[in-house]
Image (spheres, rainbow, N blue to C red):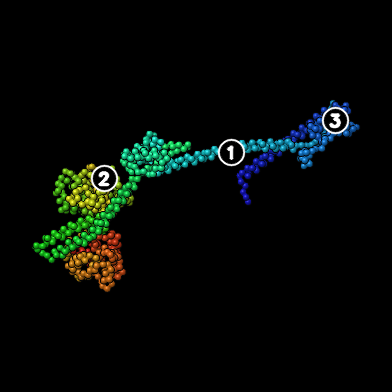
Amino acid sequence: MASTSPNNIKYVYILILFATTLSLAVALYVQQQNQHDRQQFANHAAIISEDIWAINDISASIYLKLAMKADHYKKLTVSIPGEKNFIVLEQEPLSGLSYILYSAGLIHTKELTQPVLYQEIKIGTITAVQYVRIIYPITNILLVLLLLLLIAMSIVSLFVNSKHLEEEVEVRTKNLRHSEQRFHDLVNFLPEIVLETDINGNITYANHAASTLLDPKLSSLTDKCFLDFIDESDRYDARTNFYKAIQGEPIDLKEYSALGSDNNIFPMLLKIAPMFTNELLVAGARIIVIDISSRRQLEEQLLRDQKMKAIGLMAGGVAHDLNNILSGIISYPELLLLNLPEDNRLYKPLQSIRRSGMEAAEVVSDLLTVARGVAASTEVLSLNELIEKYLESPDFKELTKTHPDVRIVTHLEPALGNVNCSRIQVRKCLMNIINNGVESITGNGCLTITSANEFCSLPATIRAEGLSSSRNPSQQKRMFSKIIITDTGEGIGAKEMQHIFEPFYSTKVMGRSGTGLGLTIVWNTMQEHDGTVQVASSTKGTTFELFFPSLNEKIPEQSKEKNWRDYIGTGETILVVDDDPRQREILKGLLTSLKYNVVTVSSGEKAEEYLQKNRADLVVLDMLMPPGNNGRVTYENILKIHPQQKAIIASGFANDEDVHATLAMGASEFIAKPYTIEQIGNAIYKTLFS
């Protein structure tokens, strides 16, 4: 069933009200008209009474004819005693519209009777048949009521429409305010600066970003020109483009240097567009300013990372080749020294050759650290112990001898947490930072070495005067053991701070007091140890903080120092897999001296072929063996042949993932080339007999 709408119900109510009003009006009119007709008929009887008394029918007939016409009588009859039809008058038949209405029953007749009195004596009777023509006044009443209804409806409609219009205006005003507020909030939410200016460039509106980046009082300023916030070197070009833009010339994004709230200069992109009045006249300009400082820093960081990567790849390749060469320089003298008495005239020269090779290997190790492709062996150690051992080393004593005016002060935390680290790499970090700190001090000064525990998120800021940049960010808090080294030197400038961790960057004389790798080694070492280095510098000195993740593990007991004879085997078969013939020859000589049965192959594929038919007690794997399989793939295939095959890794350079994957598969040790007989002997002995 169809529902009735509110509008239809309203119209039904109006129709009922109208019909009721019309009915009441017609009923009232009919009542009044009947009274009027009776009164008028009585008047007619009174007027003709004297003529009837005088039996003057002619005079009475004349009056009654006039009354018949005026009051629409169809027939009038006057009767007197003795004569029933004393006067009889009849109206002509109706015609035209009246006849049609009479035929339709809309005009009907009624009878009226009134005694004729003369001096209160009844002398006759007058009767009439009168046409009731109420249709005409009812029509007039209907028209009047319709007119009144239309007027009332018009007034109500005007009132309702006026109220609706007021509500609509209120709603639209509220929506406009909400829209303006939303636009205002959106503009203030933007990280970009939004400005509006007059035709002279004076700022008339500025969002929150403008107040934050340019001037905190900018929103209240009315006489500040946007050009005041552009560096003087770019101001002329910005002014020229501003006037071109408000004249309708399209201007692309332009890069300028902006003056910030703390007078720092930062790069920005500027876009200007004209602003018009309702009459399409230029009222000023809208300006968007995009701070691209972060983008510039990311671009610079990307360039630095690409440079580091390129240098790292180069250093790694060079280090790999050098390690293979140095193996001969270190290992051949070692083989000769095994059975050579100390009083032999060649003993010291061979030791000198071996020592020079070891020193060269240290430089190569630095290159590998830069390349970040070396998997350094780590152990649980105390940073306090490493600090104390370095301060007792000949290198440090030589440093203090050349800088006698520099005092060394230590504040070591007795309850410092242990860390899992590479002894060699941490020692290099200490040596590089302490050397730099001591050499930066002119005349009398002090270098302080402190150790401490700290529960914090991984620090990520390098600070200098006018500089702040991030490295190795982390939000997770944990316990760190840290080394703090502070000097009273001249400090590091903001420009130098941007580059201090880059390879081969140095303010020292190259080849005399530095190679430019010292702080690069510090940076990469901390990355390898899941830590970071924090630097703060000013004209009063520089502070380096090295953050190492702390461990709850105790330091294992150190076994007594052994020499190569403690690692002699009992004829076990060792399979050496290396693509370099010199490496195979050197390792075969060392292991033969340790009483092992040695088999050498030049590739991973040949090792697999050998083990298909033979067994080996242990496999010594090189990691890089182009163009064939590397050490990881070779070990995977070997485990398919002999699932329990023991192995160690001996390589000059290796990808971290490959080394970790190979160790995870079951390889027990990683030995970095070049190695000594004690190192390789210890690794093999532990793997075979532990």
Q: Nearer the viewer, residue 198 or 548?
A: 198
Q: Which of labels 1 and 3 is toward the front?
A: 3
Q: Nearer the viewer, residue 404 or 281?
A: 281
Q: Is residue 635 above or below residue 294?
A: below
Amino acid type shown at disc 1: Val
Q: Residues within 10 Å of mark 3 (few under 14, many from 20)?
A: some
Question: Which of the two labelled residues, at mark 2 and mark 3, occupies the earlier sequence position?
Answer: 3
* Label drawn at residue 160: 1
Amino acid type shown at disc 2: Lys
Amino acid type shown at disc 3: Ser
Q: Which of labels 2 and 3 is toward the front?
A: 2
Q: Is residue 219 above or below residue 568?
A: above
In the picture, the quarter occupied by the C terminus is: bottom left
| SS assignment at label 1 | helix
Residue 181 at x, y percent in the picture: 45, 41
**Spatial CA span between label 1 and label 3:** 62 Å
Residue 571 at x, y percent in the picture: 20, 71
Q: Viewed as shown, does residue 77 lie left or right of 433? A: right
Q: Quadrant of residue 39?
A: top right
Report the residue at 15% width, 47% height from top: 403
Report the residue at 28% width, 43% height from top: 466
Q: Viewed as shown, does residue 573 lie left or right of 249? A: left
Residue linked to disc 2: 495
| SS assignment at label 3 | helix
* Label drawn at residue 61: 3
